[in-house]
Image (cartoon, grey):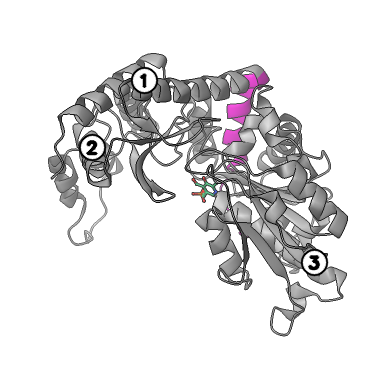
Amino acid sequence: MRELLADTAARATRYISGIDDRRVVPSEEDTARLQALGGPLPERPSDPAELVALLDDVGSPATVATTGSRYFGFVIGGTLPAALAANWLAGAWDQNAAMQIMSPVAAKVEDIVREWTLDLLGLPSSSGVGFVTCTTMANFSGLAAARSALLQRVGWNVEEDGMFEAPAIRVVVGEEVHVSVLKALSMLGLGRSRVITVPADGQGRMQAEALPVLDEHTIVCMQAGNVNTGAFDPAKEICARAREAGAWVHVDGAFGLWGAVSPRYAPLLDGVSDADSWAIDCHKWLNVPYDSGMVVVRDPEHLRRALSAGSAAYLAQGAGREPWQYTPDSSRRARGIELWAAMRSLGRSGLREMIERNCSQARLFADRLRAAGFAVLNDVVLNQVLVSFGSPEHTRCVIAEIQRDGTCWCGGTVWRGHTAMRISVSCWATTDEDVERSVAAMIRIAKSVKPE
Ligand SMILES: Cc1ncc(COP(=O)(O)O)c(C=O)c1O
């Protein structure tokens, strides 16, 4: 065991040390070599050291360097050193974070991270928090709490009696709602297409004045940080209207909620703390390993009622917060450990500095690309940039060539009818030099590529 882990640590260290000197995406040959991992399952046991060596030799070159400093696709942050180290230790601990009795350290760390997060993001300090895999599950969990609360008000127990014949719930979303919210609604029996859709402005912000009449049977799903533009729905107006009517507001704040830690970006989130539930991603901007998200619900009882499994004689209920009462899953890894490590290693000022640096790097990208004659399609209010290199065909060819080139990686999108490249800056390791090197590659490619 000792030699195996030391060898694995050495291999992982070599991988991380070389990450910025390699292509961001693997070559076709590297991907083709993955065949070596397959074949029939061996009849006899394999030596762990040999299989780790095979995994490293064949697998490492076929990774995408998402934890490196020049990956600007989707919204994928890297992994902070402290978070990775904590992940290794927690892996060795092999804790089941479901119950206090299974892991006092996992339960305690969740309590601590719950408090730190609510404080950092300015959310109500008595809120309930569940440690989930991703924003999709955080949206699911927050909306499960909303569904439970709204139906309870009219005397319907959805956990016991289900959705058949339940009183109706209306769901309002913005035109630019993230697909994960619609997926969550579909899983909750609320339907993807049953929603009332509010038009959005040119940045993707829900137009508050176009909200329908709200009431106590309505859930409004708003967004803090549009996945394309980074724009924020107007929380103050939406929450005020909802409060007056007794409606529930759920915030999909995957990466945008982290903006609250910076006085520079907090005004974009004005009023967001008046909502009822929030979904937050941690594998994105907090830069912990996949998979990690948090659901926050103002009244913990709604979250607990929606997600607790009920009782079984062999499952002990301790005093205080039982982690599994606040998540869809029961047995799970202790993902709170990495959150604790990331927050403690950065401190409040380090987290603020990382967010502000990534946002100013997004502006640097936009300035350089505009100066080179390309159109930036969004107001760069946070860490997202949309750029068009000309016609849709030309933009698509440039994106494909940037991806092939390997200096950096960005994905494509269509924003309000315009084909664009998305740049998302969300990694602790990204330096201004990384931005300059990447933007130089983008401009060189955009000027040399001819549409196919
Ligand atoms: C606004 C928003 N909501 C939800 C998601 C889904 O996040 P996850 O992939 O963690 O489920 C994303 C992902 O980029 C997002 O940007």
Question: Viewer-proximal residue, 426 or 67?
Answer: 426
Label 2, on which residue? 398
Mark 1 → mark 3, Cα distance in angstroms: 49 Å
Q: Mark 3: which amino acid?
A: Leu
Q: From the top left corner, tell me how far across and down residue 304 is, in percent.
A: 77, 58
Question: Which segment did they paint magenta?
Answer: 328-348
Of all residues shown, which one is farthest toward the top? 433
Quadrant holding the C terminus = top left
51 relative to 324 in the view: left or right: left
Three-letter residue code for mark 1: Arg
Q: At x 44% / y 31%, what residue is drawn?
A: 78
Figure disc tally: 3
Q: Which residue is at a point 23% across and 61% down the rendered structure image?
A: 41
**Location of mark 3 (residue):** 150
Q: For the residues carrying marks 1 and 3, which lies nearer the camera in this image?
A: 1
Instruction: Tell me the element at label 1.
Output: helix
Taking the image as shown, residue 169 lies to the left or right of residue 432, namely right
Tag 2's secondary structure? helix
Residue 368: numbered disc = 1
- Counting residues from the start of the chain, the first of labels 1 and 3 encountered is 3
Foreground residue among 167 and 77: 167
- Under 8 Å from ligand 1: the CB of mark 1? no
- Mark 3 vs mark 2: in front: 2
Q: Main secondary structure of the magenta part?
A: helix
Q: Look at the picture and state if 89 lies above or below 244.
A: above
Contact? badges 1 and 3 (CB < 8 Å): no
Residue 406, position as x, y percentages in the image? 23, 31
